[in-house]
Structures are given as structure tokens and as C-alpha cells.
Amino acid sequence: MATIAILKEQANGERRVALDPATCGKLIGQNHSIKIQAGAGDAAGFNDAAYTKAGASLHNDASEVLADAELLLWLTPPDAQRLQTLPTGITLVGMMLPSQHPDLLTALKAGRHQALAMELVPRITRAQSMDVLSSQATIAGYQAVLIAADLSPRLFPMLTTAAGTLRPSKVVIIGAGVAGLQAIATARRLGAQVEAYDIRAAAREQVQSLGARMIDTGVNAEGEGGYARELSAAEKQQQADVLAEHLARADVVVSTAAIPGRPAPKIITEAMVAGMQAGSVIVDLAAETGGNCVLTRPAETINSNGVTIAGPLNLASRAPLHASEMYARNVLELLKLVLDEHGAVAPDMADEVIAGCLLSQDGAIVHKLFADKS
């Protein structure tokens, strides 16, 4: 049976943990051994006692956790220095984000590590239970609307009071993927009038099922794997002209558009922002990859002629307990393909899920998206 290691996350502000105590208990129930660094789950709301009760062994030093470990699970990639200290032959499972951490590829090759990137799991039906992008985007979409409601000088719902009637806020959601749909649902729960835009025509039914109105720009850019393709110059202009009209009437805009492995598409121009009413709010979920708004500054909240623009990072970490539980379930499902019937680390390379998320092996970067960049 496998020995699985969990270390404290290193990224600034990261509050999640790769395995929650309940999932630890399930793996231990399958006769695997879990070694966890003391305090790894504190920020997520899981204390050390919860892990020891589940059967995990607790260690203060990272070197003690890693000793004899066959699998190392993480959420966000560790720095190159930690990668250099990992035992030879250990298999790594977690989000790798090589586009944002190019030094990771060099370290993986040097250490000859077998690495499975959770964010590269193919978005196919049988892998839905392993889809960390969806599970963490659910948290992000919810949190984005809460941030917008907090920043907005207006209330979201319509209220009829003795002091008069307050109209509901008008919210525009750009991008109707998992994060966008959760943002729509959350804004609707808070009582806002919601419009949504997505360049994939297939998103219309989902948007309308949540009670929002679909903005039709006449542009359809359905891409592979459920993502949107990049727009042509003419399509971008057509999109911009229609969106500008809707943004000018919006009280809140939540933007979630992304293209995997590439910078976020620039959708909200400076002219659009200038056309918005004073007191309006933009929350740009794409800030981590450059932002959908040209004025977005990652990790900052700024004011542009009366319009507040927020570029929050790592929104899933704002709800670390639920985010960690969801991530751990994704990992647990993937491990069913990584561990064989005897509990040994032996991923089936012929399996399309494993083939789709295998990033490195035997000193080489093997994933087609990054092999040429290493």
C-alpha cells in the first residue's frame, strides 16, 4: 500500500490543504498510510487532532513527512528549492500551473519526478469527479459576487420600505463557465437583476435556467473541450459594441472569461469603463492571468473615474474548508487511476485521463502543451 505525504502549502495567502481529515480517513481505510506536516490544515479549519483521529501520522519537519513517501499531494506548486529536496522517485499530484511557474518544469526534469497536474485532467464526462478547475471555480464565482456586493454602494435586492422603494442592482456576468454560472446563481439569490454574456451559444440554456437574461452579441466562438476559442478582430469589435451598451447600464460586472494556458482575453476596454456610471463595480476573476479588463491590477482594488475595479487572486482560498473538501474529493477520484489493485503507485499510461494530465516522467516533460517550453 502507498505512503502519501501532505506538506504545508507555501504560496502566500494559501489557506487550503490538499486532503481534509475525512478523505484521509477514506484512504487510510484502504490501508494506505498518510503522513502530514503539523499545522497543514489549520488555516482551512482542520486541526491536527482531526487528522490523527482519522489515522494520519503527524510530523513537524517536512523531511520527516517526505521520508519513505511514494506520493506527495499539494494544491499550489511548491517553490524550486523544495522541489530540489524531494526524494527521487516520488510521484507528485497537484496543480502544477507551468504557465505561471516555468521554473517548475526545470525542477521536475532535474528531479526525474513523475508529476500529474490536476488542472490538466481532461474535461470529459468520466473525469468530472476529478475536475479541480470546476470545483474551485464554483467557490470563486460565489466569492466574486460577495466581493462585488461588499464594494458596491448599492444593495442587490429590490426593497420596499417606509422610506421608499430601492430598485434592484443590475449585474452583468461575463463568461458562463462554472465560475460564471455560480456568480449568476449567487447574484440572483441576493436579489439582483442579472444579465450574462458568453461567446459560446451553448451557454444560453444554462444561463436562462438560472433566471438570467442572455446578452446576444451575434458572436459564437465555441471551442474545444467546452472552452471558448480566441476571437477574430471583427468579432472582438462586434462583441465590444454590444457589451458597451450593457455595461453602461450595469451596477456590477463580474468577469470570468479564460482561455486555458493563455493570458485572459481582454474584453472590457478603457472606453467601456469610462462609459459606466459612477459607483459601478467590476470584479475581475481573470486577474491571475492578466484580467479581462485592461485596467485590472492583480491583487489590487482601484478606482477609475468613479468605477471600482477589483482584481482578487486565489478566491477559492477565501472559503478554505469547503474548497479543501472539494479538492480532496477530486484527488481521491484521480488516485483510483494512479494506484493499482494492490495499492502500488502504478498509473495506467493508456488511460486517457492519466495521459491527459501526466506532465513529467523520467526526466522529461511529456505533456504536449509544455514539452516544447521546457
Image (cartoon, helix red, strand yellow):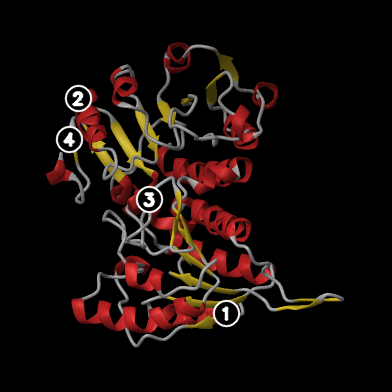
Measure how far apart labels 1 and 4 are at the Cα level. Answer: 47 Å
Amino acid type for the residue under numbered disc 2: Ala
Q: Is residue 136 above or below residue 267?
A: above
Measure how far apart labels 2 and 4 are at the Cα level. Answer: 9 Å
Task: Quickly name the residue at label 2.
Answer: 110
At x 24%, y 37%, the residue is 360
Q: What element carries label 1?
A: loop
**Crowdedness near tag 2: few (<14), some (14–19) or many (≥20) residues, C-alpha within 10 Å:** some
> Any mark on residue 152, and which?
none
Q: Quick one: quadrant of the C terminus?
A: top left
Q: What element carries label 2?
A: helix
**Crowdedness near tag 1: few (<14), some (14–19) or many (≥20) residues, C-alpha within 10 Å:** many
Task: Single out the mark in the foreground, 3 or 4.
Answer: 3
Task: Quickly name the residue at label 4.
Answer: 364
Amino acid type for the residue under numbered disc 3: Arg
Q: Which of marks 2 and 4 is nearer the N terminus?
A: 2
Residue 321 locus on image (x, y percent) = 63, 40
Task: Quickly name the residue at label 1.
Answer: 212
